[in-house]
Structure formats: C-alpha cells, structure tokens
Image: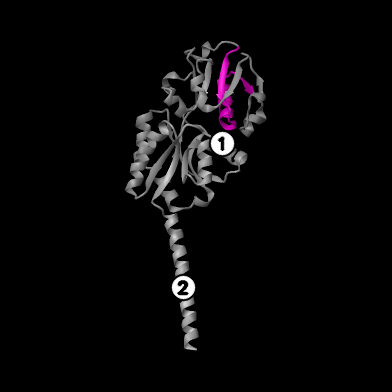
Amino acid sequence: MHSTLRRRTLALATIAGALFFTGSAAFAQDNKTAIKVGVSVGNGEQIFEVVKKVAAKDGLNIQVVVFNDYQLPNAALASGDLDANAFQHQPFLDNQNKARGFDIVPVGLTITAPLGFYSRKIKSIDQLPDGASVGIQNDPSNGNRALLLLQTAGLITLKPEAVKNNNATPLDVVSNPKKLKLVALDAAQLPRSLDDLVIAAINNDYAEKAGLSLAKDAVIKEAPKSPYANLIAVRRADKDKPWAKRLVAAYQSAEVKSFIETQFKGSLVPAF
C-alpha cells in the first residue's frame, strides 16, 4: 500500500517537474535576450546602431542582418532565420503575405521614407520631355506607389478603382499626355539604371546608397506624411512576446526619434 502510494507520488512529482521545465523553457523563449533583426542597406543600418544601444540598456541584444533585396527579409523571417525585420510598409507586407503565404504581422511603426523620382538628365520635372522613359518598381506595392506619385504630379491619370484599391499597374493608366514610357524594374536596379532612364522612382534607402538626396536631387517627391509608414514585423506567433515589445520600445525611444530628425532632416520622418 505504502509502496504504491510512493510510486504515485513520484510519478506526480515527475510530471510536475516536466511541466515546470517545459513552462520554464517556454518562458525563457518568450523572454529571450538576443534577437536577429533584418534591415535594408543604408539608413536602416544607421538607425539600428542607435536602436541597438537603447535596447542593450534594457538587456536586449540585437544582431542586425543587412539585406540588399526587398524580397529576402520576409522569407528569412518566415523561415525562422530572423526574429523580426524592419524595412517595409504595410501595403508591401500585405502583398508578400498574400503572394507568398507568409503569416507575418506588424508590431510597431518606425519611419516614413518619402518616395522620390530622380534624374541625371533633368533638374526639374518641368523639363521632362515627351516620350521620356520613366522607371518604376516592379513589385506591386511600390509600383503602385510610384504611379500614384506620377498622378499627383499631373503626368498620368489612373483608373479610379485602381487608386481606391491601391493596386495600380501601368495597365491602369488611362491618360498619358506626354506618352511616357513606363519601365518596371527591380527596386535595387533603379539607381543603376538612371543613365538609361530620364527619371526613376527610387526608394529612400537605395537613393541614399547611390548618393542621392530627397531634398536636393528629387524632381518629384511625396509629402513627408504618407500612408507608407515603415514598420517592425514578426511572425504572428511572436507578436505578443516580451522581446517584441522591448524591440518596439527601443525603436520608438526618444533617443532614436532625435537621431532620425537630426540625421536625416526630413528625408526620413519618425512615424511614431
């Protein structure tokens, strides 16, 4: 009788110990102190040097992984090679989730990087000749964004439905009085194609890497406040983890905000 009771007690203790160990491991995973974050080359690297220092004060060690291609950071996050990334806006993330089957969600806003059209051939958009070749991004969200900016500048007119749904493509152009030739290229390729194009839409990080300034060099540019605020993204299963909240808090700190405003002087705008 006593032997049976002892065996039952030992079994319950073993189960309880296993549950405690499992729970502790899960807690440790939720509260991990070292994470990998993917960012795009250029200003993302600069900003995260400050974010790293702020996060370190809170005991969170950030390893920054730099990407030269917009298609790779979400794939790396989805596969578990990264814990988070910070390079994209919501329309781009929505498109990637839909097109590639990712389950990635935003956890906090970072910056707005106004899009600009740049040129090595003209100094003002008033000098844009008829039949000019115009480079835009070939990914759906940034291509749509570039077309909207051309419409805002009065150079083309898009189908209202495409504007409403934020999914405009060159096929949605209904008016093109200058007979512009729209050339869709990979975002990273556009700066290298400026010699072959009259103007090209170039995302801020690639523009900066190419030595282009939104304030000085852009012949068309978005207003500082736009719907295209960049964000920190994680896998859905991690969205409520303590480390994710600490990452967002580090980015949205007063130190980082001051650095963005001082360093970039309006070419990047804090979105938080």
> Where does residue 214 sit, x and y in percent of width and height?
44, 23
Q: Is residue 151 left or right of residue 87?
A: right
Q: Amino acid at mark 2?
A: Thr
Place residue 45 in its image quadrant: top left
| Residue 90 within the segment the image draws in magenta | no
217 in relation to 165, above or below: above
Compute the Cα span from label 2 to label 1: 50 Å
Q: Residue at x 53, y 15 (%)?
A: 196
Place residue 38 in its image quadrant: top left
Residue 129: mark: none
Place residue 257 in its image quadrant: top left
Local packing at callout 2 (Cα closer than 10 Å; few below 14, some 14-19, many 20+) is: few
SS type, badge 1: helix
Q: Residue at x 59, y 37 (%)?
A: 95
Residue 91: mark: 1
SS type, badge 2: helix
Tell me which label, 2 or 1, sits earlier in the chain: 2
**Label 2, on which residue?**
14
- Colour scheme of the rendered structure: one colour
The quadrant of the picture occupied by the C terminus is top left
Q: Residue at x 36, y 38 (%)?
A: 49
> Where does residue 265 sit, x and y in percent of width and height?
38, 28
Specify start and end residues of the magenta stretch as a single range.
Answer: 131-157
